[in-house]
Structure formats: C-alpha cells, structure tokens
Amino acid sequence: MKTINKISFNDIESIPQLVKDFLNQKIEGFENNTFSLDHFRQQIHLKKDSFSSEKRETLSGVLESQLSDFTLSSKQRENLDHLKLPNTFTITTGHQLNLFSGPVFFVYKILQTIKTCTYLKEKFPDFNFVPIYWMASEDHDFAEINHFKTENNYYETNEKSGGPVGRIEISDTYFISEFEKEFKDSIFGTELILMMKEAYKSGNTLTKAIKILVNRLFSEFGLLILDGDSKELKSQMKEIFKDELLHFSLQKNSKNKVDLLTEKYGKVQVNPREINLFYLSETRDRIEFNGQKYIIVDKTIQFTEEEILNELENHPERFSPNALMRPVYQENVLPNLAYIGGNAEIMYWLELKDYFSKISISFPILIPRNSMLFLKEKTVGKIEKLDLKIEDFFQNFTVLTNQKILKDNPILQLLEEKEESLISNFSALRTSAETTEKSFGNMVKAEEVRQLKSFKRMKKRLLHAEKIKQNELLERLENLFLDVHPAKTWQERVYNFSVFFSDYGYSWLENCLEEMVVQDSKLIIVAI
C-alpha cells in the first residue's frame, strides 16, 4: 500500500461550501471551534471547569455496565480508569448501527478519533484523551441501516422494526451464508466470517452485534463504546428535556443561526422542530404539543403538562433525542472536547451554537472527518496513461471528459477562431451603430446574439459527433470514473470495510491509522 496523494477539502468541488467556510474560519461565531492546539487548550479549561465529578462517576459506571460482557484490552481498561480523573477528556464520533458497520467511512471516523487522542496526548501530556464511539441505537429507521455492499454483492437483513433499532433482535441471518460464499477463499476471509457470525448470532440485539464487531476491530486502540439508550445518562437530561417540552427552547434559540445559514447557503441540514424529542414505547414516535396536550404522533397516547413532566421525572429513558438534540445529550454527559463527523453532521451541529450557550454547555471543536480512497495499481496506471491526475476525478468530470474528447481538435480550433473574429467584427459594428438611430443598434446586438448561439450549437454538435467517433476513449473514461466512484459516488460511501480487510486484515487498519491526518480535513488516496 502506498499513499499517492492527500487532497485538501478546499480543493474538492463537491465538498459543501459551508464546510469549506467553516474550515477556513469564515463563519462568524465559530472561529474558536476549528482544529488548533490553542482551541483545544481553551476547550480543556472550559470542560474541566464545567464537568462535575458526579457526572464522571455516572459515566464510568454506565460504561463499566455496558461493557461488562466484553474482555477489555489493557488500553480500554486504562481509559475507563482515566475517565474518573478530572484531567481526562473525550474525543467522540457517532454513527448508526449499520449492518456489519455499513459503508467503510464508519471505520475511518473511528480511526481518526483514535489518532486525534494520540496526537493530543503528545501535545498535552498532563491530560488524558479517550476515544468514544457513540452508538445511535435509538434511531428507528431500520431501512437506512439493514444492508451493506461489497464489490460483488449487496447484503440485507429483514427484521420487524419501528422502535429503536438497537433493541431489534436478530433472526434473519441468511446474509451470513451468502457473505461466507463471497469471502471464504480470501486471505482474511475466515476472520471476517467469524466476526460476522459472532456479532450477528440469532438472539443478539443490533446494539450487541455492533458492540461485538467494533470491539473486535478497535479494542487494542483503547476505543470505548457508549450506548445513549441509558436511564442513568438520560437522568442528567431531565432539566433540558423539561425546558424543551415547556418552552420549545432548541427551536427558539437556534433560529438566528438557522436563518443566518439559510440566507448564506440556501438551506440547513436539519430543520428544528417545535419539540425535538421522541417518545419510546414499543415504537419511537414524535412528541407534539397541540396547545393543550402533548400528543404522541401515530399513537393514542396523550399527556397533560403535569402528566408528561411526571413521566419525564420517573422514566427519563422513555424520552429520546432527535438528530439535533442528540449532540446536546452527548455533550452534557461526556467530558468531550471535539466531535468528528461527516460533512452533513458538521452542518447540523453548526445550527446549535446559540442553544448550547443558552443551556450553558460548552460547544465542542468540530472536525470534518478525513476521507479515504483505495485504488488498485492497475487503475492508477490507466489514469496516468490517459494523462490525467487522480484529483481530476473529484472535479466536474463531465467538463473534464468533454475537454479530453475535444483536445487539439482542429475543427474546434477553427470554430473558436471564427467565433473570436465574429465577436471582434460585431464589436466594431456596435461602435459604429451607436452613431445612428437606436433601433439599428438594437438590431446589431440581436444579430450578434443569434450568430453566437449558432457557434454554441455547432460546438455542441461537434462534441456529440466526436463522442461517437471516439467512443472507445469515452468508454475508457467512464469506466475509470466508475473505478474511482463506484455507483457514481465516493467509494467510502458504497463499499463495506470487508472489501479491504479480506485482503489485508488488521494491517489495513494500521495503514489507515498511519496515513490519517488529524490537523486537516483531507481526501487520502492510497494505491493497493
């Protein structure tokens, strides 16, 4: 494996402008929430002063309980012990419970979280930094997470859903036998198959399955896995949830940021609701207020104000944060300094800054996660043979293809020469036309537009003709694009980690960790 390029997000066309502006400190109010040692130093002092020893004890107890079924590595054990100390902080990433981890960027997120902790320990040796994977176990959209894809196959499981996905018990394991057929002859295929069979054993919940898998992959790195579906942790959210139910505080206090981001970037990632909480019964359903009562949507359950506050007091575990309230929950129960997430996650975190201030929780440093791309040496060779660079595949590839098809085309050169001549002639004619009656000048301008449109049509028809003539080149370019972007999107959003682990095993994880950049957000391209 050889790293051949690391491309800054600023140089990639498809990275949202909002993310680029955030990274470049161009969004007012977020200058101190980007990656820098000074910002981490500030966050350490903010969190040290605000995160109580009682919260540390609760967090340690919950983690001990949730991980009690696992044999922990010495590094995990050390991190658990450190969490009780006032000089210990967390770096967190979070993700859904996708089948067998889903797309491979899940792995990259966690590895960057681990490496960031190592980096911070080197820079701040008097403090400890613990990597946390926050499980989105309460999400209820099972269809989003019940599948994964390899180079050759699509795998899916079907279970009864509607409530928190983490509580779903596994019964449909047909995908395991199909997976075994694909990977049984791979170098590390047996290890992958055993991981899958252990994690997705009938009767295991999806929460347990992902814990088993993630622990197998990352225990030696000291990663701790936290499930937010916890009465003890939610008990720390009672006042915040109460305020949300009574005063709709998140929506009110995020309005200015939402309006600012909408005005500048067209829309926000997630629009806040009046009440940003779900109610958990056998399903997970939104809570709405109709002016008199609190209604559980799609249920016959209703509460008066007094009843719902009693329910919250006695059963906080029945209240579940939505995508916007989850960051608040996380930052309230963790001594957290930074969150590492994808572009979409970063974009909705930005909506919450004022709300964090209102409820007196320090807003973390936000780190757009690194992306990785693994290309076969053969593919890299084909790209170079066509006199292209890999970064070309992350710009407007249609424009690039058209340029390649028409490169050094004599007809195009002739058309452009004649077009330039036409523009020059009409420029002179317009100057003369200005000396006569206005309608004549307008006619000259209109004729210029008409004739230039003809040149545009001719160039378009020329491109069409050359694509037919150079069909072989066009096909090679399109196939190369699909080698880089399977299913016409980034590789990391399509393939499961098994595609790479099957050939390289744990050394692939080590290589990803080694090449991972923590100070900047980059696309890391590796030849294999």
Image: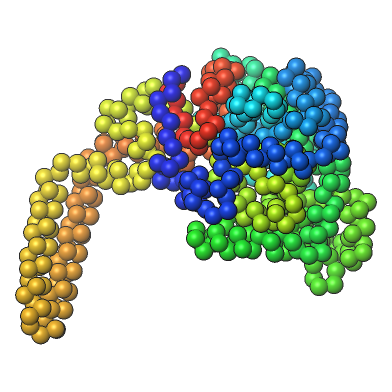
Q: Nearer the viewer, residue 213 or 130?
A: 130
- Tell me: residue 122, above or below residue 291: above
> Which residue corresponds to the image point at 75% horizontal and 63% vertical from the top-left?
248
Residue shown at the point (52%, 30%) measured from the top left: 517
Question: Is residue 165 at least partly visible in the picture?
Answer: no
Instruction: Indicate left or right for 510 with 464 as reference.
Output: right
The one nearer the camera, 177 or 141, is 141
Q: Quadrant of residue 419?
A: bottom left
Question: In the image, residue 12 lies at what x, y percent?
Answer: 41, 42
Q: Residue at x 72, y 40 (%)?
A: 47
Q: Nearer the viewer, residue 181 or 230?
A: 230
Q: How is the image coloured?
A: rainbow
Identity of the residue drawn at 26% across and 46% down? 402
Looking at the image, which residue sits at the far top? 187
Residue 377 at what x, y percent from top left? 39, 22
The image shows residue 114 at horizontal and vertical percentages of 63, 27
42 is higher (above) or lower (below) than 21: above
173 displayed left or right of 379: right
Answer whether residue 459 is visible to the viewer in this image: yes
**Coordinates of residue 527 in the picture (x, y in percent):** 42, 23
Rendered position, 80 above or below 358: above
Relative vertical location of residue 400 with respect to residue 437 in this rendering, above or below: above
Locate the C terminus and report the quarter of the image it occupies. top left
Residue 409 location, quadrant: top left
Q: Is residue 503 left or right of residue 7?
A: right
